[in-house]
Every structure is written in C-alpha cells, then in structure tokens.
Image (cartoon, rainbow, N blue to C red):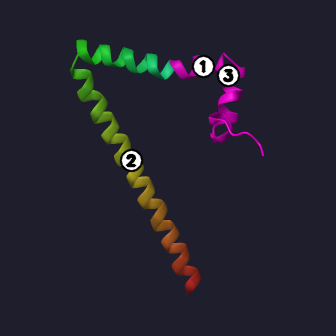
Amino acid sequence: MAETTPMSMCPMAETCKGMFDKPRSGLWMMIPGIIFIALGVLIFLYPQILAWLISIALIVMGIAMLMMVNFMRGIGKRTSSTAN
C-alpha cells in the first residue's frame, strides 16, 4: 500500500513542484500584486482615478456584450438557415 501524504493527494502538487523548481516564475506572480498595490496607492492619492477605471471597465464590458450578442445572432442565423 502506497503511503499518502498531503502533497501526493493534492491535484496541483505537480504544478506547484514545477513552479518551485523554477524560482524565477515567482517573480511573474508578484508583478500583478505589485501593480495592484501601486494602483491602490494611486487611487488613495487621486480618487478620481477610480471613476476613470470604473468607466473604462463599463465601456469594455459593454463592447464585449455587444460582440457576444453579435456572435450569438450569427450562430442563430446559421442554425436557422441549416434547419430550412
């Protein structure tokens, strides 16, 4: 019977082991955290940045929704034309 350890039971153990073998990969994971901290400090100093970020996010989400609707309508047209 094989001995089970917490690491052998974890489905992400192989992925984590690969990341630990390459220590430079940790830097790429730290960059988003550093960016979020810097953005938080900037928002604290200049609150109007938050309004800009929210408005940009809403615009991008609106564009994405319009693209999704256009894609879904195209699929509907293709399925209705093949059904006839």
Mark 1 residue crowding within 10 angstroms, few (<14) / some (14–19) / many (20+): few
Chief SS of the magenta region = helix
Residue 3 pos. (x, y %): 73, 39
* Position above or below: 9 against 45: below
Q: Please name the amino acid that badge 2 sits on.
A: Ile
Identify the mark at residue 82; answer none if there is no mark: none
Q: Residue at x 66, y 36 (%)?
A: 5
Q: Which residues are magenta?
A: 1-30
Residue at x 78%, y 46% (from the top left corner): 1
Q: Position of residue 23 (x, y in %)?
A: 67, 16
- Residue on which disc 2 sits: 63
**Looking at the image, which residue is at 52% across and 18% down?**
30
Q: Are marks 2 and 1 in contact (CB under 8 Å)?
A: no
Mark closer to the chain start, 2 or 1: 1
Q: Which badge, 3 or 2, is on the more N-terminal residue?
A: 3
Above or below, comparing residue 54 to residue 77 in the picture: above
User: Where does label 3 land, which residue?
Assistant: 20
The residues bearing labels 2 and 1 have C-alpha atoms spaced at a distance of 34 Å
Question: 65 and 30: which one is in front?
Answer: 30
In the rendered structure, find residue 26 and report the number of the disc placed on it: 1
Q: Nearer the viewer, mark 3 or mark 2?
A: 3
Secondary structure type for disc 1: helix
Q: Amino acid at mark 1?
A: Gly
Residue 52, by quadrant, is top left
- Mark-to-mark CA distance, 1 and 3: 8 Å
